């Protein structure tokens, strides 16, 4: 068992697709919250193989897409501080802020380095004792514990030139905000698999309980998504609404207690601004007072400048599932992967990028 | 979001491990999964193991999917 | 103290002459180069293929090769993609001052070996040395000429509906091998660059039939970009099957880890051929007899509808578009 190819076997997909077609009678709209699920769905053409009763819509689970211009502008301002090295995941490099992007400031001479892990960022800090390494902390509950661990490691190893700009966000609060807005009628939710590996399945209980919407926690292989859709269809046809885990090999209801402990030790919830949704209470993470000396915003005096939102960009509506990329006046004309206006096009998991790259027009 | 891929733990030193995925090896951190052992498969996200994969659950899921495929073939 | 290349080595004086004699002419030994005239003079008859390339790869040494081997193979392959028999190369070095002499020697050694295998000669060259910071250790520029045999007319606009698409082997090896050396992405792998000269492979294919419609080597931008270029140039669509495209397990794993798609990762020893359907199996057999075509596979076909598009059939039987690479290939966590 290697946990990968086994979950891509096409003959098992045929069985699931067939069962979904047989069972699905009630028209239903499902949202996949997570950008990684959006990529799998488009990459394998899953929408094409589902029956016409099922309508899929993508949600705001792309931490890149939901990072507000004002927050990215802070990172850009930090890149201009002398002797600062910005360490970032590759995802953020091309995202346009109010006036620039990390890729652009890098071309203009700022020290911006792409890393795969905070482990690599800590090493850069150790190797460059006369500089300050600022790690751009983006990501949801899957990633936040790794940044928490990096801060604890920095303390242990007495690394004094490592800082974090925390732009981390939490998923359950924003889902509540979307459901409360009532903009999009959902009949089922495909819950993020790796966020749930950390937080477990209980944080999603409120969706089934308070909103009567069936939820299934899914993995990221095509079979995982199909299994999830199959389980949602079964709940709908049986008139049920509960939270189920399809991704049983990776997720247990209680989540990863150690990861949750470290996250709570280093971070505490705070309000956060989600692009297109606005401010959502308790949906962000900031460093606790005890660890404030790692906070890049407090350590450096920066002036990000006024925030500017691109006119005509409807990323916000797309993130809430209210519009599709095809509804955006800029999509494919002014806003393309080569010249992205908004983050939904820049991020490889953004709906617009997936739509454009994998051919939404093909029905994928 | 959150790319995480299965990796096999080959050796452990302190709170780090050498993990192998499909023939490539990388040093990963076990800070989030202190209970991981040599021979375990873990989900690796940005260089950290975020959970230990449950082999039994994986096999059961595949059995279930195989059963669904058999039923589908019978239903014609 | 280790010998280093200095600014003086590029200034045309005695030091420069010594460098050229010792480091380039001697190891690359051939009569044309030894003359050290301002230009190499030779006779030819027939149709000429002419190409130029610059090599700026970093790091300059990577698993399976170095910038020197890359320069020779890359230039030879550009000529081979027109069906030409590669003959002569020019070689220009832009060296950052401070480059250790030993590293330069190692690279020239690679060039000599690669040139010998590809049966080409380096007949003219140039050396410049620039200030520290003005070149990333070493930049190499080449030009190459080759002769195209009679009756051969290969071009990107010749793909026709019904043609088959053949890939000579696994994709993504070079890009991932180079990426594994980059700071911030450290992982170790036995994977090596697939850097190789394909002149002989193409010659053997032409022996089967001169009627090859298109040839392309999928370097930067990967297979996806090359297929898109061909589809646009020929005004056709290309349909490929995901399950038929060979990818090494290690490349797949590295791509999964970094969030990359192997279709966009660079190759330096592979080609994609578009050939008439009735000859496809014969070409495939011939390719598999060559060392650099052992893993060859028919991966798709050319169609008339949706001109300019590349479409892939996924393992679920559904279709998705394969677009060209936009900008840099960046690792991602989401």
Image: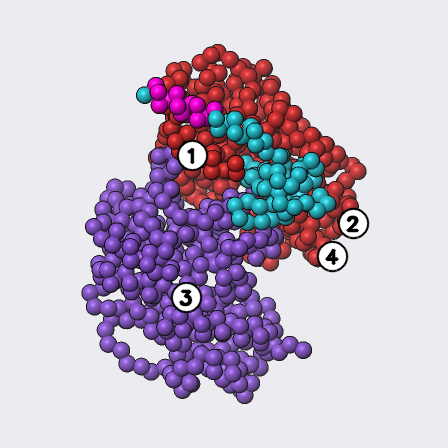
Chain colours: A red, B cyan, C purple
| Chain under disc 1 | A
CA–CA distance in space, label 1 to label 3: 38 Å
3D distance between C-alphas at marks 4 and 2: 11 Å
The earlier-in-sequence mark between 1 and 4 is 1
Q: CA distance from mark 2 to mark 3?
A: 48 Å
Of tags 2 and 3, the one toward the viewer is 3
Residue designated by label 3: C73
Task: Work out whether disc 4 and disc 2 sit on a shared chain.
Answer: yes
Crowd band around label 2 with a 10 angstrom C-alpha radius: few (<14), some (14–19), many (20+): few
**Stretch in magenta:** B64-75
Q: Is C299 placed above or below A233 here?
A: below
Classed neighbour count for the residue bearing mark 1: other residues with Cα under 10 Å, few (<14), some (14–19), many (≥20)? some
Percent from the top left, x then y, of residue A18?
A: 37, 23
Q: Are marks 4 and 2 in contact (CB under 8 Å)?
A: no
- CA distance for labels 4 and 3: 41 Å
Q: C198 or B22: nearer the eye?
A: B22
Say whether residue A146 is magenta: no
Q: Residue at x 51, y 85 (%)?
A: C17
Mark 2–mark 3 CB contact (< 8 Å): no
Name the foreground residue: C208 vs B2.
C208
Tell which of B5 and C179 is nearer to you. B5
Are the residues under marks 1 and 4 on the same chain? yes
Q: Residue shown at 41%/72% (left/top)?
A: C115
What number is the disc on residue A129?
A: 4
Residue with the mark numbered 2: A158
Q: Is residue A250 left or right of residue B74?
A: right
């Amino acid at each position: 068992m290697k946990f990968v190819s086994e979950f891509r076997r096409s003959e098992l997909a045929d069985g699931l697709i067939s069962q979904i077609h047989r069972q699905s009678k009630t028209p239903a709209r499902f949202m996949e919250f997570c950008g990684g699920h959006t990529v799998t769905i488009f990459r394998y053409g899953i929408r094409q193989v589902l029956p016409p009763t099922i309508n899929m819509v993508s949600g705001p689970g792309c931490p890149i897409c939901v990072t507000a211009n004002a927050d990215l502008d802070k990172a850009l301002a930090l890149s201009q501080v002398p002797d600062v090295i910005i360490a970032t995941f590759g995802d953020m490099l091309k995202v346009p802020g109010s006036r620039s992007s990390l890729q652009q400031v890098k071309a203009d001479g700022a020290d911006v380095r792409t890393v795969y892990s905070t482990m690599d960022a800590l090493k850069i800090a150790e190797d460059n004792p006369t500089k300050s390494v600022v790690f751009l902390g983006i990501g949801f509950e899957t990633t936040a514990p790794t940044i928490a661990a990096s801060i604890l490691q920095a303390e242990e190893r007495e690394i004094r030139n490592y800082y974090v700009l925390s732009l981390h966000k939490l998923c359950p609060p924003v889902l509540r905000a979307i459901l409360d807005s009532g903009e999009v009628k959902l009949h089922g939710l495909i819950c993020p698999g790796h966020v749930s590996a950390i937080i477990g399945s209980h944080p999603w209980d409120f969706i089934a309980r308070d909103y009567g919407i069936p939820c299934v926690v899914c993995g990221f292989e095509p079979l995982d998504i199909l299994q999830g859709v199959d389980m949602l269809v079964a709940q709908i046809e049986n008139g049920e609404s509960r939270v189920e885990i399809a991704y049983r090999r990776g997720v247990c209801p209680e989540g990863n207690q150690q990861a949750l402990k470290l996250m709570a030790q280093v971070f505490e919830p705070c309000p956060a601004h989600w692009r297109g949704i606005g401010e959502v209470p308790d949906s962000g993470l900031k460093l606790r007072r005890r660890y404030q000396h790692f906070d890049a915003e407090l350590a450096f005096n920066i002036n990000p400048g006024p925030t500017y939102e691109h006119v005509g960009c409807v990323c916000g509506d797309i993130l809430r599932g209210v519009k599709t990329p095809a509804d955006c006046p800029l999509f494919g004309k002014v806003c393309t992967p080569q010249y992205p206006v908004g983050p939904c096009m820049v991020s490889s998991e953004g709906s617009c990028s997936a739509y454009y790259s994998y051919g939404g027009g093909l029905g994928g | 979001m959150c790319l995480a891929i299965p990796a096999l733990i080959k050796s452990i030193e302190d709170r780090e491990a050498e993990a192998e995925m499909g023939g490539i090896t990388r040093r990963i951190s076990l800070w989030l999964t202190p209970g991981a052992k040599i021979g375990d498969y873990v989900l690796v996200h940005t260089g950290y193991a975020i959970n230990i994969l449950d082999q039994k659950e994986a096999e059961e899921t595949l059995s279930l999917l195989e059963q669904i495929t058999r039923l589908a073939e019978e239903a014609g | 103290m280790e010998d280093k290349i200095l600014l003086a080595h590029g200034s045309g004086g005695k030091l420069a002459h010594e460098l050229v004699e010792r480091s380039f002419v001697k190891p690359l030994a051939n009569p044309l180069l030894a003359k050290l005239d301002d230009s190499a003079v030779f006779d030819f008859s027939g149709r000429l293929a002419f190409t130029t390339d610059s090599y700026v790869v970093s790091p300059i040494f990577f698993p399976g090769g170095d910038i020197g081997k890359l320069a020779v193979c890359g230039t030879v392959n550009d000529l081979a993609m027109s069906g030409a028999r590669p003959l002569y190369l020019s070689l220009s070095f832009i060296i950052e001052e401070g480059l250790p002499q030993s590293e330069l020697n190692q690279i020239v050694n690679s060039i000599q070996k690669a040139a010998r295998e590809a049966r080409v000669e380096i007949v003219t060259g140039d050396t410049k040395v620039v200030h520290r910071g003005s070149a990333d250790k070493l930049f190499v520029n080449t030009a190459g000429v080759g002769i195209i045999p009679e009756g051969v007319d290969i071009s990107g606009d010749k793909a026709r509906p019904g043609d088959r698409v053949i890939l000579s082997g696994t994709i993504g090896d070079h890009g991932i091998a180079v990426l594994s050396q980059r700071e911030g992405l450290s992982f170790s792998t036995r994977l090596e660059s697939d850097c190789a000269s394909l002149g002989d492979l193409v010659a053997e294919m032409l022996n089967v039939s001169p009627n090859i419609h298109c040839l392309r080597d999928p370097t930067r931008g990967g297979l996806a970009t090359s297929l898109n270029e061909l589809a646009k140039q020929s005004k056709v669509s290309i349909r490929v099957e995901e399950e038929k495209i060979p990818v090494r397990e290690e490349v797949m794993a590295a791509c999964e880890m970094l969030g990359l798609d192997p279709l966009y990762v660079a190759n330096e020893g592979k080609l994609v051929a578009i050939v008439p359907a009735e000859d496809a199996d014969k070409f495939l057999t011939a390719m598999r007899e060559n060392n650099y075509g052992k893993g060859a596979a028919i991966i798709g076909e050319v169609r008339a509808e949706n001109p300019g598009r590349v479409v892939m059939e996924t393992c679920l039987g559904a279709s998705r578009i394969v677009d060209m690479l936009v900008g840099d290939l960046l690792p991602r966590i989401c």
